[in-house]
Image (cartoon, rainbow, N blue to C red):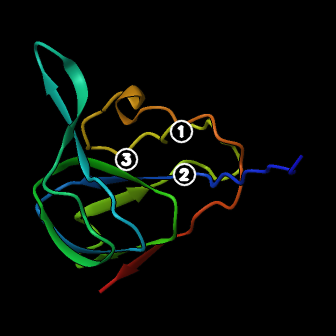
């Protein structure tokens, strides 16, 4: 009988806290879905799709203020035009279940549950996030 093995990659969760309307460039090696943390009376805090799927390659984004997040299984680069307009956060890489760190004031507090869990995969290669300022 053949020896069947599987390899799992860890998922990189990236949260973007946009303090004021901002321009940024996202470079990915896979298709990702950008979500926005939204709040309403009926559902409370929840994830809401923001725009179309972002295809692999280089994508320029114009984001109004708010909290956005996406997941990737490969390396990602975020290029910011204004370092004061956007805060970029990722969970600590040494634990598979770490929550998102709280955003710096004065960003509105968004419950960690909005971002969802990090999954149940076995830790593997953790993708790299690079943040650059243009």
Q: How crowded is mark 2: few (under 14 residues within 10 Å), some or many (20 or more)?
A: many
Q: Quadrant of the C terminus?
A: bottom left
Callout 1–callout 3 Cβ contact below 8 Å: no
Q: How crowded is mark 1: few (under 14 residues within 10 Å), some or many (20 or more)?
A: some
Find disc 2 in the rendering and name its residue.
11
Q: Marks 2 and 3, Cα distance to the nearest angstrom?
A: 24 Å
Residue 117 location (% of width, % of height)? 50, 32
Residue at the image position 89 percent from the left and 46 percent from the top: 1
Q: State the residue in front, 118 or 81.
A: 118
Residue 68 relative to residue 38: left or right:
right
Residue 37 location (% of width, % of height)? 24, 37
Q: State the residue in front, 82 or 3.
A: 3
Callout 2–callout 3 Cβ contact below 8 Å: no
Q: Residues within 10 Å of mark 3 (few under 14, many from 20)?
A: few
Which residue in the rendered view is the most extreme toward the bottom? 134
Q: Marks 1 and 2, Cα distance to the nearest angstrom?
A: 7 Å
Label whose residue precedes the other's in the sequence (2 or 3): 2
Find disc 1 in the rendering and name its residue.
118
- 25 shown above or below 31: below
Find disc 3 in the rendering and name its residue.
104
**Figure quadrant of residue 120:** top right
User: Please, what secondary structure does the residue beneath circle 2 have?
Assistant: loop
Callout 1–callout 2 Cβ contact below 8 Å: yes
Label whose residue precedes the other's in the sequence (1 or 3): 3
Q: State the residue in front, 97 or 124.
A: 124
């Amino acid at each position: 009988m053949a020896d069947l093995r599987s390899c799992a990659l860890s998922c990189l969760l990236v949260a973007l806290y946009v303090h004021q309307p901002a321009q940024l460039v996202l470079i990915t090696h896979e298709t990702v879905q950008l979500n926005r943390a939204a709040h309403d009376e009926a559902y409370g805090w929840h994830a809401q799709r923001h725009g179309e799927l972002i295809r692999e390659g280089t994508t320029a984004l114009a984001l109004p203020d708010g909290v956005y997040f996406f997941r990737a299984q490969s390396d990602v680069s975020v290029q910011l035009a204004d370092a004061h307009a956007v805060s970029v956060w990722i969970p600590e890489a040494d634990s598979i279940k770490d929550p998102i760190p709280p955003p710096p004031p004065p960003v509105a507090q968004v419950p960690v549950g909005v971002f969802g869990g990090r999954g149940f995969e076995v830790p593997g290669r953790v993708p790299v996030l690079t943040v650059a300022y243009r």
